[in-house]
Image (cartoon, rainbow, N blue to C red):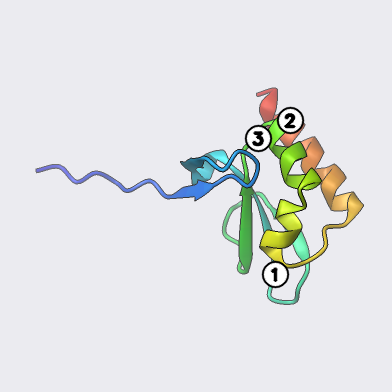
Amino acid sequence: MSKHKKIPLRICLGCREKIPKKDLVRLVRTPDNEVVLDMTGKKPGRGAYLCPREECFKKAVKGKRLERNLQQPISSRLTADLAQVIKNKESE
């Protein structure tokens, strides 16, 4: 009897698909209400996930899905950083 390791799934805020957590980009609202990119996936706070695809990023930003999910406004600098991370991951 082999045990299968359970793969944690999260919903992308762009396409609304369930995707393995390790394949997504995570933003987190920290306990002191700061929104930051979380490349490790382990920072404490409320997380929001996006697939590393430009169309998902655009949908999430245009529809203010990230801001609504994190209950916090997203700075334009963070949006630019997120766009760069997604562009880098998409080209991998």
Q: Which mark is residue 52?
A: 3
Q: Residues within 10 Å of mark 1 (few under 14, many from 20)?
A: some
Distance, label 3 to label 2, CA atoms, is 9 Å
Q: Nearer the viewer, residue 78 or 74?
A: 74
- The quarter of the image holding the C terminus is top right
Distance, label 1 to label 2, CA atoms, is 24 Å
Question: What is the x, y in percent for residue 56?
Answer: 68, 36
First-in-chain label (3 vs 1): 1
Question: What is the x, y in percent for residue 9?
Answer: 45, 47
**Which amino acid type corresponds to the residue marked 2 in the rendered image?**
Asn
Q: Residues within 10 Å of mark 2 (few under 14, many from 20)?
A: few
Looking at this rendering, what residue extends furthest in the top direction? 91
Looking at this rendering, what residue extends furthest in the front direction? 63
Secondary structure, mark 3, is: loop
Q: Which mark is residue 30?
A: 1
**Which amino acid type corresponds to the residue marked 1 in the rendered image?**
Thr
Q: Nearer the viewer, residue 42 or 53?
A: 53
Q: Residues within 10 Å of mark 3 (few under 14, many from 20)?
A: many
| Label 3 close to label 2 by CB (< 8 Å) | no
**Which amino acid type corresponds to the residue marked 3 in the rendered image?**
Pro
Residue pointed to by mark 2: 88
**Residue 36: which quarter of the image?**
bottom right
